[in-house]
């Protein structure tokens, strides 16, 4: 067996080992990402509360940017129940009228807050696991094919030298 063939088969075995070793790493990364997303969702749900707000004024036209009409308008509203009661500007739909009821997310201080993330923790974990698995497998493929290409270049260069050497002696 030629030395280049041994190197080529060694690189392919290494690529296969990397591909197999990537699986538990991907599972671990996905599980960790899922656990983090679950903790974040619990933290957000513990500090944000959905309350009903009553619109007091018609929606105000916000300034247009780049000629585009914004999706949401701003209107003054009041919300409760206490201790989360409060009032102030909130985002409402364009067709909202005074007296309409809308859902508002508020923090523990009673001020409007961003709604909790809607992303599923399971989807987050699967995405991370798939990303790690894809990166590991693509790395293994690049190692196997790139290594094979480099070994072939070296082998062909050695063959060219041998053919030139043989061609000089026969003439």
Image: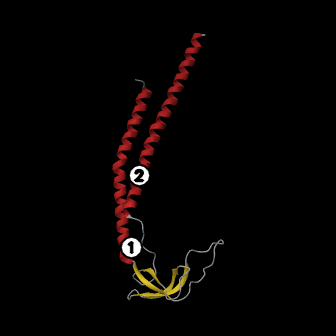
* Residue that lies at the very extreme toward the right in this rendered image: 67
In the image, residue 29 above or below residue 140: below
Identify which residue, 63 or 69, lies in the foreground: 69
Kindly identify the residue that appears in the image at 38 percent across and 36 percent down: 13
Q: Residues within 10 Å of mark 1 (few under 14, many from 20)?
A: some
Give percent across and percent down for residue 97. Answer: 53, 86
Circle 1 SS class:
helix
Indicate the quadrant containing the C terminus: top left, top right, bottom left or bottom right.
top right
On residue 44, which mark appears? 1
Identify which residue, 122 or 35, lies in the foreground: 122
Circle 2 SS class:
helix
Indicate the quadrant containing the N terminus: top left, top right, bottom left or bottom right.
top left
How far, Cα to Cα, is label 2 from label 1? Answer: 27 Å
The picture quadrant where one finds residue 129 is: bottom left
- Label 2 vs 1, first from the N-terminus: 1
Number of numbered tags placed on the structure image: 2
On residue 133, which mark appears? none
Left or right position of 170 against 2: right
Give percent across and percent down for residue 72. Answer: 55, 77
Kindly identify the residue that appears in the image at 35 percent across and 68 percent down: 39
Give percent across and percent down for residue 162. Answer: 53, 19
Kindly identify the residue that appears in the image at 52 percent across and 26 percent down: 156
Give percent across and percent down for residue 83. Answer: 38, 88
Kindly identify the residue that appears in the image at 37 percent across and 74 percent down: 45
Q: Which residue is mark 2?
A: 132
The reply to whether the C-beta atoms of the residues labelled 2 and 1 are less than 8 Å apart is no
In the image, residue 154 above or below residue 168: below
Q: Residues within 10 Å of mark 2 (few under 14, many from 20)?
A: many
In the image, residue 13 above or below residue 67: above
Identify which residue, 111 or 99, lies in the foreground: 99
Q: How is the image coloured?
A: secondary structure
């Amino acid at each position: 067996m030629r030395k280049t063939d041994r190197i080529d088969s060694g690189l392919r075995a290494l690529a296969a080992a990397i591909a197999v070793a990537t699986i538990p790493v991907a599972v671990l990364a996905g599980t960790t990402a899922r656990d983090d997303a679950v903790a974040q969702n619990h933290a957000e749900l513990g500090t944000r509360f959905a309350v009903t707000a009553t619109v007091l004024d018609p929606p105000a036209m916000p300034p247009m940017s780049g000629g585009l009409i914004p999706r949401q308008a701003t209107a003054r509203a009041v919300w409760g129940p206490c201790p989360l009661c409060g009032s102030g500007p909130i985002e409402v739909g364009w067709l909202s009228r005074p007296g309409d009821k809308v859902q508002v997310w508020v923090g523990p201080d009673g001020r409007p807050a961003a709604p909790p993330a809607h992303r599923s923790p399971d989807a987050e974990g699967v995405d991370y696991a798939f990303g790690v698995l894809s990166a590991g497998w693509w790395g293994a493929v690049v190692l196997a094919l790139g290594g094979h290409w480099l070994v072939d270049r070296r082998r062909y260069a050695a063959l060219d030298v041998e053919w030139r050497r043989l061609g000089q002696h026969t003439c």
